[in-house]
Every structure is written in C-alpha cells, then in structure tokens.
C-alpha cells in the first residue's frame, strides 16, 4: 500500500507540473491526491508496520524519548487503536495546515483591502526619475522590502502594476519584471511572512522571526544586490525611459490605508513574540482591526457621496471593502496549499519522509543536500519540498539548517520563471516566455543564489 500512496503522489505532482499542458488547474490534482492518499491510509491501516508521530517527531516503535515519553509500538496495536492513531494524526496535520491557511487568508485580505483604497498607488510617488538604471534600483529595493511585508507574490503583482503606469515599453518592462522576481524572492526569504515556505517553517516552530532576520538578512541582500548591480551594466538599462502619462484621480485615503495595513501585518510577529500564541491569532486581530477602520472610512465616504440617504439596492455588502476583498483573494491557491501539505503529511505519517531524511544524512553532506533542494525548487514547487524537509530533520528551533532551507527554497526558485509564485504571476502579467527568462534572467538569479548561499555557509556552517 505504501508504494501505491507514493505513486499517487508522483502522478499527482506530475499533473501539477504539467498544469499548462493538461489545461487543468493545479488545485485539482492537489486535492485529489490528498483525498486519495488519506483514503488509502484508512483502507490499509492494518497492513502498515511503521507510523510517524509528528507531535513528538518520532516513530511509534516502542522506544523511550529524551523527555521520558515511551512511544507505543505501532506494529503491536489492534485495529481500533490504529484507527484512533490515524484520526489523531489527521486532526493534528489538518490543524497545523489550517493555521497556515487562515494566516494566508488574513494577509491576502489585508492586501486586497489596501488595493480597494488604491493604497499601492502611493508607491508611484517614490519614483522621481526617468533613468533606467535608477528605476531598476528603486523597483528592486522596493520589491525586496515589500516582499518581506506583504509576501513575494503580492509584491511582484503590485510593482508590475506600478511599472505598467511608468514604463509603456513592454519589452523593457520584461527586464524589470525579471529582476523584480529575483528581488522579491530574496526579500521573502528572510521574513516569516515573506514567503509561504518561511511561514510554514515559522509556524511549525522550526525558525523564529528574529532568527530568520539574523541568519538570512545578509545572504538575502547579497542575493538581490549582486544580480541588480550586474544588470545595471547591461545595454538594456542604459539611458532614460519615456514615462507614461500621469493618471488624474487618486483616493485620498490610499496612503493612510497602505501604511496602516503594512504596519498591522508587521505587528503579527510582534504579537506572537509577546503572547506565544500561533501567528494566525495575531493575523486575525490585524485583519479585524483593519477591517473595522476600512468599514468606518468606507461608510463615511458613502454617506458623503449619498447625502440624501438613498437605500442600498445592491445588498448589505455592496459598499463593504472587507467583503469585496474576501471575494478577490486567491482561494485556488489556498486549496492548492491544503492539498499539497496534507498529501505530504500522509507520506510523513507512514515514516517515509523520516526514513528518507535519515538515509540522506548518512549518504550526503546536509549543506550540499539543501543546496540541491534550492536548485530543485526552480523546477519543483518549493512548498512540498519544504514540507518534506520538515519531516526529514529532527533539529531544534533556529538550527542553521532550517534557515539554510528557508534561504534555498525561497531564492532558488528564481532560477526558472516557473520556479516561484512570483515568477509565474509575472509570466502571466507581462507575457514573459520560459526561454526568454532562461536566456536573460536565469544566469543573474543563479549568481545571486550561489553568492548568498556562499555567504551563509561562510558565516554559519
């Protein structure tokens, strides 16, 4: 049965990677392989010899742990006890996965509320130049900083949207978009809320927010600065660009809502540090407070624009920025993460990932393995890679290996345009081809990745 479950994962993941060829959204195979894997676990529960307890990060093999806990022997359990163990494991993984998903829903909603008030238009005011080289530094630095706050995917969308209003030349925008991908992925790697993989590591107690910054801020800066510096000497970034026409009407509440929203997102790690509650609690507080402000501001604007008090004929939510934001968040991405994380959890429960990690540690240098994992994330989605790595290594919080995994998985995807969510969205927005990116940007991303990894290993290995 173990072989069948692994085969389900392989076929499901193959369907995910061939999403564009099959014309089937990746969430479909993700959800199917999740459900099938756990159904097969339930049917074959009496035939399994091993089981992995994720709560204690140990196999159920009757051994005594360091804290004195004696693990039951799974092979000696009866049918009812095995089913109870299965249900407990499923509930544990679903709870941990839900923490991540609700955290992401909260962050996405705050970003959408900011956009509802045209808050990101404020970023245009930071650009006071028509020099191609200066603009490159501005968008890359903004991408690096914004991705650490609102995640690399959203930062990429925001900056490309701004670029469309500044740079009418589509071919020139492709170059800027390529470097934004590198900068956004580098910026997301050192922040617990900058990339879904760092969020996973943070929320599962592998890294702390302060630890991520301490270990990864310098390698991430190198990963962003070096490719940007090299790009400034390329012919395409010589001279000036012709700016687009300025737009007229701007929402006066936009700057206030942007700064307040970003502050509340940054507040989430602070709340976790002081309360020791899961991060999604702080995110729900930030979302609730921000939604309250948004509703007050929106109702005031509605009243001013409707002094006669005419009734709302479009339903009670027509003027609610929160409702509109919730209707625009990427639910397919949320369900995709659910399918991937719960499928990996099924493989972990059988002890397959733990045994694989043990074999890797015995046959290969760990730093080399993590470096290859980063390169692999350019081809294979980094979410299951990081999810699997959390079951491979039994290390304490803030061990340097966890931080190297965060760096490698976060920045390695920049080497191919399909290797990160930021790359995929830029590919769609600017119609960037796979081979154009491979020819023009991939080598810059590779240089940045290797340089940052070298700095990390020099400091912490």
Image: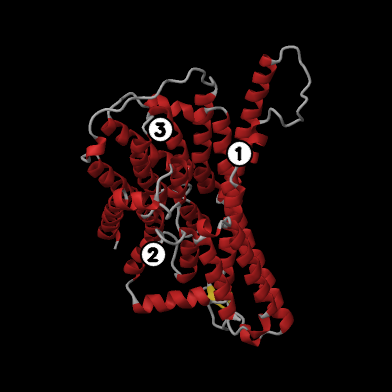
Q: Secondary structure at mark 1?
A: helix
The quadrant of the image that shows the N terminus is bottom right
Depicted 291 relative to depicted 363: above or below: above
Q: CA distance from mark 2 to mark 3?
A: 32 Å
Q: Assess disc 2: are there few (<14), some (14-19) or many (≥20) residues with their C-alpha within 10 Å of its C-alpha.
A: many
Q: Nearer the viewer, residue 291 or 65?
A: 291
220 with respect to 271 (left or right): left
Mark 2 vs 3: CB contact within 8 A = no
Q: Residue shown at 44%/70% (left/top)?
A: 393
The residue at which mark 3 appears reads as: 163
415 with respect to 68 (left or right): left
x%, y% of residue 355? 48, 78
Q: Which mark is residue 373?
A: 2
Of the two numbered discs 2 and 1 in the rendering, the one whose residue sits closer to the viewer: 2
Residue 53 in view, yes or no: no
Task: Identify the coloring.
Answer: secondary structure
Residue 118 in view, yes or no: yes
- First reached walking from the N terminus: tag 3 or tag 1: 3
Q: Nearer the viewer, residue 429 or 356?
A: 429
Q: Assess disc 1: are there few (<14), some (14-19) or many (≥20) residues with their C-alpha within 10 Å of its C-alpha.
A: many
Depicted 411 relative to depicted 106: above or below: below
- First reached walking from the N terminus: tag 2 or tag 3: 3
Of the two numbered discs 3 and 1 in the rendering, the one whose residue sits closer to the viewer: 3
Q: How many marks?
A: 3
The residue at which mark 1 appears reads as: 287
Q: Which mark is residue 98?
A: none
- First reached walking from the N terminus: tag 2 or tag 1: 1
Q: Secondary structure at mark 2?
A: helix
């Amino acid at each position: 049965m173990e072989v069948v479950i692994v085969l389900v994962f392989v076929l499901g993941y193959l369907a995910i990677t061939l999403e564009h060829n099959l014309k089937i959204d990746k969430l479909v195979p993700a959800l199917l392989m999740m459900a099938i894997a756990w159904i097969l676990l339930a049917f074959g529960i009496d035939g399994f010899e091993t089981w992995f307890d994720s709560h204690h990060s140990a196999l159920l093999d009757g051994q005594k742990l360091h804290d004195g806990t004696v693990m039951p022997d799974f092979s000696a359990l009866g049918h009812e006890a095995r089913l109870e163990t299965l249900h407990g494991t499923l509930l544990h993984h679903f709870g941990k996965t839900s923490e991540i998903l609700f955290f992401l829903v909260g962050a996405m909603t705050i970003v959408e509320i900011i956009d509802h008030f045209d808050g990101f238009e404020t970023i245009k005011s930071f650009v006071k130049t028509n020099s191609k080289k200066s603009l490159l530094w501005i968008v890359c630095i903004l991408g690096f900083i914004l991705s650490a706050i609102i995640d690399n995917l959203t930062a990429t969308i925001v900056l490309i949207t701004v670029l469309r209003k500044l740079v009418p030349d589509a071919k020139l925008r492709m170059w800027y978009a390529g470097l934004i991908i590198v900068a956004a992925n580098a910026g997301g790697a050192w922040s617990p809320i900058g990339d879904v993989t760092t969020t996973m590591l943070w929320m599962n107690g592998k890294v702390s927010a302060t630890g991520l910054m301490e270990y990864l801020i310098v390698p991430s800066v190198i990963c962003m600065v070096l490719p940007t510096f090299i790009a400034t000497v390329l012919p395409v970034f010589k001279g000036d660009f012709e700016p687009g026409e300025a737009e007229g009407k701007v929402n006066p509440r936009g700057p206030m809502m942007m700064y307040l929203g970003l502050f509340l997102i940054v507040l989430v790690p602070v709340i976790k540090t002081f309360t020791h509650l899961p991060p999604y609690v702080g995110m729900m507080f930030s979302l609730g407070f921000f939604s309250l402000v948004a509703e007050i501001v929106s109702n005031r604007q509605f009243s001013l624009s409707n002094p006669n008090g005419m009734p709302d004929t479009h339903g009670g939510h027509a003027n609610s920025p929160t409702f509109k934001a919730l209707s625009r968040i990427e639910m397919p991405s949320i369900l995709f993460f659910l399918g991937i994380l719960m499928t990996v959890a099924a493989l972990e429960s059988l002890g397959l990932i733990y045994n694989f990690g043990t074999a890797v540690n015995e046959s290969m240098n760990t730093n080399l393995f993590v470096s290859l994992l980063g390169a692999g994330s350019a081809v294979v989605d980094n979410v299951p890679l990081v999810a699997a790595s959390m079951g491979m290594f039994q290390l304490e919080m803030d061990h340097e290996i966890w931080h190297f995994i965060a760096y490698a998985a976060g920045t390695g995807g920049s080497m191919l345009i399909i290797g990160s969510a930021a790359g995929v969205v830029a590919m769609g927005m600017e119609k960037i081809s796979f081979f154009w990116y491979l020819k023009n940007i991939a080598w810059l991303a590779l240089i940045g990745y290797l340089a940052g990894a070298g700095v990390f290993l020099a400091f912490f290995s």
